[in-house]
Image (spheres, grey):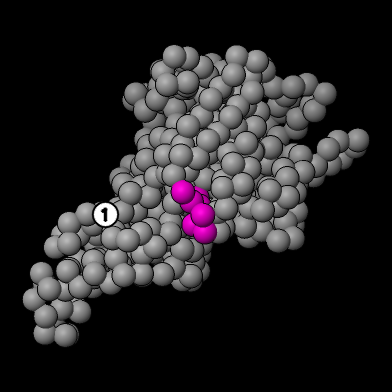
Amino acid sequence: MPYTNPTNLAVVACPGGESFADEVIVHLRQMYKHRYNLKRDVISKHYEMERAEYIKSVNFHNDIISSDICGKGAIDKYRAPHFKVDTEFTYFMNGEFKTEIKDCIRGKDVYIFQDVENHQELSLNGGKNKIALSVNDHVMSMLVTIDAVRQAGAGSITLVLPVYPYSRQHKKKGREGLTASLLGHVYEQLSVNRIITLDIHSREIENAFSKAHIENLHASYQIIRELAKLVDLTGKTEDIVIVSPDTGAVDRNKFYSSGLNKPLAMLYKERDYSVVTQNAKSTNIKSVKLLGDVKGKVAFLADDMLGTGGTMLKAMEFLKEQGATKVICAISLPFFTGNAIEQFDEAYKKGLFYRVIGTNSVFHKKLLDCEWYINTDVSGLFANVITRVHHRQSLSDLLDNRTIIDKLVKRD
Ligand code: R5P
């Protein structure tokens, strides 16, 4: 599959995933153009060709292999790939969805984007309806879309699903369902070949798949890049301690602790699971204990997701009480449900934390305006992974980003 003709790579964006898909497409276009120019310069020199001759011959070659009688676009210019498939979504007033694929995608490698935590008002039915959709609406619209893509004869289907829905239901204690794996089985039934996700809540979910591949990306490099602008990572002017906000987040924070070469502390919380957390104030957390020392230090905490914000606010308040100078937290998947933003605004005014670093994997307009919020962009990472998957190249250095983190920390 040549870099000069990526027409087999097609993006279908579900209504919730449109914003993230557009950001990824910007990177894809830049990457392909960069690669094209690089090849043009090297190959035209190697073959002693004029650049113009090279461009013409690439277009000629692509036109020859294309099933169209003649490819679209000028013969003497770079033809920028489009990627995005024209798709029509209908939202019926009883809550049902319909997806219609308007372009031919037969045999193509289709990447379906969905952001199940996008609860902004979406413009549906050609702008006639403005509706905020729930996680379940987004899951259903994605299933309908996968089916439409499958029925349209796609060669392969990849879900680009930064938030893996129902990931917190990955294990059961009593008579509960295993909803994370249930959804995995549904995707496989619908012929999904691969899922690209971000910081999945539990690696156990991967065990649910017998055919599809899961690529679980990490936002740690992008997070550390922002952290380095906020604190002195060399430790010369301030001491930093990495704090796991609960036992479930230990591995994630251990990664930051070893990557940044800083000590690790941990919070231990007693929860009352008979209570459902309503919002950041009314949570099921009954008591908090600290293992380690944060006094006089900058405390950095990382969690995979932030829902009501109760877990993080409680942790940050407690760390301040224990004498932390600054509290900074990082969230890969910032849902900020209900009135979480207001609760964070309040806590920020009280000086309970310094900054929250979050990724753009969840579209949340209001969050971007908060003084305390730092947005870090993971769309380039997703674009990189998509092109590597598409061109059958290794993902290892993108999945295990310790080397680039090491370089970043040493540079700082
Ligand atoms: C829990 O295991 C997760 O990693 C998060 O800590 C939790 O889901 C956050 O939820 P909330 O913000 O509602 O406390």
The magenta stretch spans residue 304: no
Q: Indicate the quadrant where residue 38 lies.
A: bottom left
Whether 247 is drawn above or below 3: the answer is above
In the image, the segment drawn in magenta is 104-111
The residue where tag 1 is placed is 72
In this view of the protein, can residue 129 be seen by the observer? yes
The magenta stretch spans residue 110: yes
Name the dominant secondary structure of the magenta segment: loop
Q: Nearer the viewer, residue 242 or 70?
A: 70
Q: Residue 56, percent across and down?
A: 17, 69
Q: Residue at x 44, y 51 (%)?
A: 10
Q: Nearer the viewer, residue 176 or 351?
A: 176
Q: Nearer the viewer, residue 122 or 378?
A: 122
Q: Residue 400, percent across and down?
A: 50, 64
Q: Residue at x 46, y 71 (%)?
A: 393
Q: Residue 338, percent across and down?
A: 56, 18
Q: Nearer the viewer, residue 158 or 303?
A: 158
Report whether 205 appears left or right of 353.
Answer: right
Q: Residue at x 20, y 79 (%)?
A: 43
Q: Residue at x 37, y 28 (%)?
A: 368
User: Looking at the picture, which amino acid does disc 1 mark?
Assistant: Lys
- Whether ligand 1 has any atom under 8 Å from the Cβ at mark 1 is answered as no
